[in-house]
Amino acid sequence: MLFFFENEVFYSFNLLLTASVYMAMVFVYKTKEYQFVFSVMLVYAVYQLVENTPLYAVDSLVYALVGILYIGFAYAFRNHTFIEKVFRLTSGAVSFLAFIYITYESILIQEQSSSWLLLAAYVVIMVNYLVLSNVTKYVIFTYLAPVFFFVSMAQLWDLTQTGPWFFFLYTAASLLFLYGGIWTKVKWLQVLKDSNLYTSLFVLTGCLYYALYDLQYGYSAIMLLIVSLLSYFVKKSSAHADMKSTAVWVLPSGLVAASAIFYQKLLEWVPAYSEGYSISFHIALTGVLLLGLHYVWEKAEEDDFAMSTFYIAEGTYVAAIMLLLVDDGVDPMVVRPLLLLTGIGMMYLLVRYSRKTYYWSFVSVASLAFYTSLIDPFGIDSFSNVLMYMIFAPVVLIAIGEWGEKKSKGMRPHFYMLGHIVQPFIVLLILLDQLGTEYVHPALLMIPLGVYVFSALKAGRESGTKTMLYAALTTGYLFIVTLSKELGWDEVSYEDAFLASSFLYAVLWFFVSGEWKKRIEWYIIPFSILGLFVVISDVPLEAEGEWLLVIGYTVFNLFFLHQRSWPLVRFVPLILTFGLWEKLRVFWTDMDMTLVLVLSILGLLGSGKLLQKRLFGPGVDADAYTWTALLYIGYLNLYTLWDESVWIRILPVVLLSLWFYLGGKKCSEKFLQNVFYTGAAVSLYGAYLMIAAAYSEYIPDLIIAEVQALPVLIVLAFVRKNIWSASAEMMSYVQFAALLLISGYLVVDAIQSHTIWDAWIIGGLSLASMVAGMQLRIKSYFLVGMGVLIFNIIYQTRPYWGNLPWWVYLLIAGLVLIGIASYNEWQKQRSESEKPVEQKWKKLWKAFKKWQ
C-alpha cells in the first residue's frame, strides 16, 4: 500500500479519481462549487502525470492540450448551462496559464527559447482560443486568438531565421490582415475578422516603427509599399465604409512615404544623387510619378484612387517646393528653376482638376518663385541689381493676371494679391538700400507707383480702389523723400517732403472728379495732420517767416477738414499750433507773442462766427475754432499775467468777455445764452477791477471800496433788465444777496477806516438806496438801505447812548412796555372807523408787497 501512495504516477491517478468524485458530487449533492475543485485537481493531476512519465518529453504540447480537454468537458455537459460556461472559461484561463508556464519553462528552466514542440503548443493554444471565440461571446477570446497567431509566427521565425524578425512578422500580419480580416469566408474565422484586422494593424504599425527606429530604410520602404497594396485590397474588399475612405488616402500617402524613405537608401547606392538634385528633386519627382499614377487610375476608372492620388501628388510637389527654401543642395542654375517651372504646371492642373479658383494662389506663388529662381541663371549678383530685377516681379504677376483673366475667370485677383503683398517689401528694401553708399536710383519707385495707380483704376471694389490709391500716394511721398537725396538737395528734409507731398496731393485733388476727390480726402487729411505734427515737432523754425508756412499748412488742413465736415477732427490741427508757439517763444519777446496770440484769437473767433453756426451740437458737432480760442485765451494769460501795463494784462479778460458774447450768440437754448452773456458782463467787470487796482494810487482811499464794489450794482441792473428779464423773481434774490454782500463789505470798510466821512458816505449811500427803492419800488434796495442807515445811526451814536447808567436803560424799557400796553388797550376801546392810522399802515403794507 505504501508503494501506491509514494509512487508519483499512482498519485496522479489518485488525483484523477478524486477529481472525478468531486465532479460526481456536483450532481449528487447539487453543489456547483465542487466543479471548481474538480478543475483544479484535474490540472494538478495532469501535471503530476506528465512530470513523472515519458510524457515529459512532450510536456509543452500536453499542457497546451489541457485547454482543449476542458472544451471537451464543456461539450459533454452541454445540457448543463452553468457547467458548460464554467468549463469554457476554465479552458481559456488554463490555456493562458499554460502559455506562461511553457514559455517560462522553455526559456529559464530548459534554457532554450525555441523548438518545434513549443511551436505546436502555441498553435494548439491558438486553436483553443479560436474554438472559444466561436462557442462563446467573450470578445477577449477573439483577440487572444490572433495574438497567439503572432506568438506562433514569432516562434516560427525563431526556428527558421528567415529574414529580419520585424519584416517576417510584418509579412505575417499582412497575410492575416488580408485573409483573416478581409477575404476569409471560413465560418470559424468570420467571428475573428474585426479582431484580426485591428490586431494586424497594431503589429504592422509596431514593426514599421521599429524598422524606422533601426534605420532600416530599404525594409521600411518595402513595408510602406505593402501598406499601399493592403490599402488597395481594403478598398476593394472591406465592408467597412470608414476603412474604405481611409484606404483611398493611405494608398498614395504610403507611396510618398516609401519614396521619401527610399531616398536615404538611394544615397547609399548613388552618393552623387545628393549633389545637384537632393531631397527636393526626389520629392518633386515622386509627386510627378504620382500624377502619372493618377492618370492610370483614371484609365482604370478608379475614381476614388484617382482623386486621392491627384491631391497627394499635388501636396507632395508643394512640399518639394517648400523644401527648396532650406535645401541648398539643389542646383540653382537648372534644377531649381526647372522644379519651379514644373510646379507652375502642377498648380495649374490643381486648379483645373478641383475647379476651385482659390488654388490660383498656388499658381501665383509658384510663378513668383520661378521668377525669383532666375536670379542665379541670369548672373545677377549685387544687391542693387537684385532690387532692379525684383522691382518688376509685381509687374509680371499683374500682367499674367490680366492676360490669364481673359482665359480663366477668377485668376486675376490672386496674382494681383500676391503682387501687392510682395511690392511693399520691395519698396522697403529700396528705402533701406538708400542708406548705403551705392544705391539704386529712386526713379525705380515710379514702377510701384505706376502699378498702384493701374491697380486703383482696375480695381472692382471700392475698398480695393482706396487701398491702391493710398498705397500710390504713400509711394509718391517716399519718392519725393529719396529723390531729394539723389539730386543733392540735402537741405530738403523729410518734413519738407510732407509739405511738398500735401501740395501735390491738393493739385491732384483739384483736377480729379468728385468721386476721386472723396477718396483722396480720406488720405490727404490724416497725412497732412501727421505732416503738420512732424513739421512742428522736428523743424527748428529758425528762419525768418518760416512759422507762416506752418500756419499756412494748418489752414491747408482745415480747408480739407471742411470738405469732409469733420468738426471734431478740426481740433487736432488747431491744438497742434500750440507746439508752434512753444517753439517760437524761444526766439520772440513776450510782446510779440502777445500780439500774435491776440490776432490768432480774433481770427479764431471770426472763423468760428463765419464757418460754424452753433457752439456745440447737434450730436457730436462742435465749433472747434471758438473752443480753441478759449484755450488760446488761457495760453495768452501766461504772457500777460506779469506784464507791467494793466492794458496788456486785461487783454485775456476782455477777450474772454468777447468769447462769452460770441459764444452766447451761437447757443440755441435761452438759458445757456443768458449764462454766456452773464459771463461776458462779469468778465468786463473783472477787467474794470484790474484797471481800478492798477490805478488805485490815483483814487482816494476814502472811496476805493465804493469804486470797486458799487459797479456791481450797475452790472446787476444791466443783467437783470437785458439778460434775465424773464427770471425776475430769481434775480430779485440774487440782487438782494448782492446788496447784502456789498453793504456788508462797505460797512466793514467804514468801520475799519473809522472816519466821519465814511459815516457820511455810508449814510448817504443807504439813504440813496432807500430813495431808489421807494422810487423804483424795489424791496431789496429799500430794506437794505434802511437797515444800513439804522445800523449807521446806532453805530455812530454809540459814544452817547453807550455811556448812560444802567438804570436809564431800565427806565426806557419800562416806558416802552407801558406805552405798548397802553396803546393796545386804547385800540381795543375804539371802533374800526376810529382807526385811520392802522388802516393807512395796512394800505402801505399791501402796496409794499407789490414791489419788486
Image: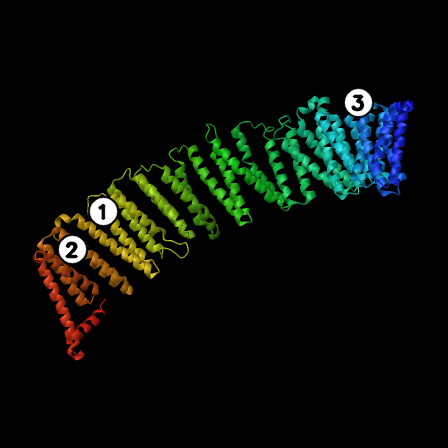
Give me the residue at 29% from left, 39% from top. 585
User: Mark 2 and 1 residues: CB-CB less than 8 Å, in contact?
Assistant: no
Look at label 1 and name its amino acid.
Arg
Q: Amino acid at mark 3?
A: Ile
**Quarter of the image where the C terminus is located:** bottom left
Disc 3 to disc 1, how far (Cα)? 114 Å
Pointer 2 or 3: first along the chain: 3
Check if mark 3's residue and mark 1's residue have beta carbons within 8 Å: no
Which of the labelled discs sits on residue 649, or is there none? Answer: 1
Say the numbered circle drawn on residue 107: 3
User: Observer-nearest residue: 646 or 554?
Assistant: 646
Could you classify mark 3 by the number of other residues whose Cα lies within 10 Å: few (under 14), some (14-19), or many (20 or more)? few
Q: Quadrant of residue 810?
A: bottom left
Q: CA distance from mark 2 to mark 1?
A: 31 Å
In this orientation, does residue 426 appear? Answer: yes
Task: Please report whichever mark, 3 or 1, sits nearer to the chain's N-terminal start.
Answer: 3
- Mark 2 highlights which residue? 747
Q: Nearer the viewer, residue 427 or 674?
A: 674
| Residue 796 image position (x, y, % from top left) | 10, 57
Task: Please state the horizontal and vertical placement of residue 29, each as a whole percent of the image.
Answer: 87, 40
Q: 401 or 110, which lies in front? A: 110
Q: Say if mark 2 contacts mark 3, CB within 8 Å.
A: no
- Tell me what residue is drawn at x 33 percent, y 41 percent: 580
